[in-house]
Amino acid sequence: MLKYRRLIFLPLMLLCAAVLYFGVFFPPVSVPQLVVTHDADGDGVYDLADLVDGARQSVAAGLTYKSAYYKGGYPPETEGVCTDLIWRAYRAAGWDLKALVDADIASDPAAYPRTNGTPDPNIDFRRVENLNIFFSRNAEVLTTTLVPRDAENLAQWQGGDIVVVDGHIGMLSNRRNRNGVPYVIHHPNGKPREENILELWAKTGRIDGHYRYLPEG
């Protein structure tokens, strides 16, 4: 009996030692949260936080991943892809991202090669390439260099920011891991999720764009 107790006790001691070590030498990094005191939809929640809440609505709804073309542009509320999570987050915060993208394409079609000179409002706002161009033209363009545990660098990565990665797009969460790196709210194949994946994307050099977009008005 004593032998079995020792077998149980030793791993517990090692676990406690590991928890103590990481807690002392690698404490959670504290990163100031950016607050933009503007509330586009007048719901009492400031815009960046509203965007995060809107993105989380897709996660809570457990939408089905389906890529298809829809007359009128919008997919059914029960399905979507990565780009749909983005416009839905903006809709929840009080903006019509589709109208903003369509207007920008109409103002300069040549800036959007994916449209091939013939814009299609039924699909243009749901293409990652077009959104990447739209945000690069209209949003605050931010660093794509991520330095875990560096509070000064991490302060540039805030909830509500947009990240573009390998033909995929997501929104940063206001939740962070122990290294101070934000989680990502996105819709890959499967269900939408809030995931601790940004650090991996940065390590593999996959972050193509990082934007903060709060439309005027």
Image: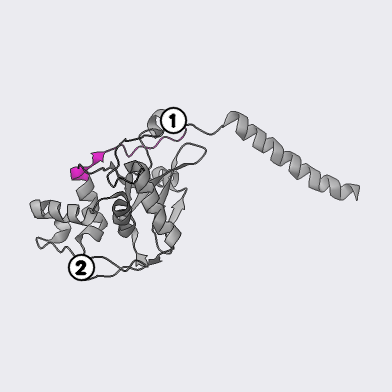
Residue 203: image location, x then y, percent: 42, 43
Q: Is residue 190 magenta?
A: no
Q: Main secondary structure of the magenta part?
A: loop
Q: Earlier in the sequence, mark 1 or mark 2?
A: 2
What is the x, y in percent for residue 180? 47, 36
Q: Position of residue 130 (x, y in %)?
A: 21, 55
- Quadrant of the image for the C terminus? top left
Which mark, by number, is residue 179?
Answer: none
- Is residue 152 at all visible to an observer of this figure? yes
* Residue at figure coordinates x 41%, y 53% from the top left: 56
Quick one: label 1, few (<14), some, or many (20+) residues within 10 Å?
A: some
Q: Magenta stretch: give its range.
A: 136-151
Q: Which residue is mark 1?
A: 150
The residues bearing labels 1 and 2 have C-alpha atoms spaced at a distance of 45 Å
Q: At 18% from the left edge and 52% from the top edge, which residue is drawn? A: 100
**Point 70% across, 41% down: residue:** 15
Q: Residues within 10 Å of mark 2 (few under 14, many from 20)?
A: few
Identify the residue position indicated by label 2 in the image.
72
